[in-house]
Amino acid sequence: AEQEVAERLQKVMARAGVASRRHCEALILAGRVTVNGQVVTKLGTKVVPGKDVIEVDGRPLGTPETKVYVMLNKPKGYVSTLYDPQGRPKVIDLLGDDVAQRVYPVGRLDFDTEGLLLLTNDGDLAHGLMHPSRMVKETYIVKVRGVPGPAKLRALQEGIELEDGPTAPAEVKMLDVRPPNSATLSVRIHEGRNRQVRRMFAALGHEVIHLRRTTLGPLKLGDLPVGEWRYLTDQEVADLYRAAGLRLGGRPRRAGRR
C-alpha cells in the first residue's frame, strides 16, 4: 500500500491557496476549520491531504473562491487580527455574514486606531501592496497633544531615529492648531512598521490623542461611516493592482456592493 503522509493542517491549507500560513493558523485558532466534520483548533494537527476532508467556513478545500475586496472604516477598540487571545472585538466581526468568503486584513491598524482597512482573499494583491519595494503610501490624520513647532515638522519630513532604525521621510501638513493644547496633522508615509506614527510623535514628545488612516495607495476612505464597509469598485481594484505592480488577470471578482 502507498505510504500516507500526514502533514500539518496549516501547511496543507496554505498550499491549497487559502491564505498565508500565518493567516491559516489564525483561521484554525478562530475555530473556522473542520477536519472530517470536527472543528479543529490545535495548530499541530496532522492531516492526510486527499483523504481527510478539510473545510474552512464550511467550504471544502480546493474550491476556487471568488476574489473579494472590502473597504472598512475601522472603529477604535477593534483588533485587525483574525484571532485575539484576549477576546477583544475583531474587525472581521463587523462584516457579519454578508461576506461569504474568508477575507483577511491587508496590513493592520492598532486597536486604538480608526480608519481605512482593506480586507481581501487576494493573496497576490495583499503581498504586492505590503511589499517594501512598492512603497505604497498611506495617509493618516493625527491629533496630538501640544503643538509641534517647525523644527519638529522638519524632523518628521527628514526622518526620525527610532529604536528599529530611522524612519523614511514623511509628507507632513499642519491642518489645525489649537494652542497650547493640541494640533491636527496629515502624515503620509510608505512604511508599515508597528505603531509607527504613534512612535514618531512620541519621539518628538507629543502623545497621539486620535489617529485615523484615510488613504492606502490610490484607495480613499471618503465618507464611509465608522464601522461600515463596502465592496470596492472595479476601478478601485484596478488602481490597487497598478499600485502593487501587478497585472490584472481575467479573474472573476466581487466588486460593487449588493
Image (spheres, rainbow, N blue to C red):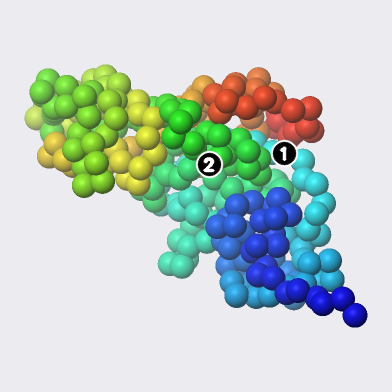
Q: Residue at x 59, y 71 (%)?
A: 43
Residue 194 shows in this picture: yes
Question: How far apart are the two marked residues, 2 and 1, measured between alpha carbons?
Answer: 14 Å
- Secondary element at tag 1: strand
The residue where tag 2 is placed is 106
Q: x, y percentage for residue 211?
A: 33, 37
Left/right placement of residue 138 relative to residue 100 reads: left
Residue type at mark 1 is Lys
Q: Residue at x 73, y 34 (%)?
A: 254
User: Is residue 152 positioned above or below 111 on the image?
Assistant: above
Q: Residue at x 71, y 30 (%)?
A: 255
- Secondary element at tag 2: loop
First of labels 2, 1 by sequence position = 1
User: Is residue 235 positioned above or below 100 on the image?
Assistant: above
Residue type at mark 2 is Val
The quarter of the image holding the C terminus is top right
Q: x, y percentage for residue 13?
A: 69, 59
The residue where tag 1 is placed is 67
Q: Residue at x 16, y 40 (%)?
A: 203
Between residues 7 and 192, which one lies in front from this camera angle? 7
**Quarter of the figure with residue 25:** bottom right
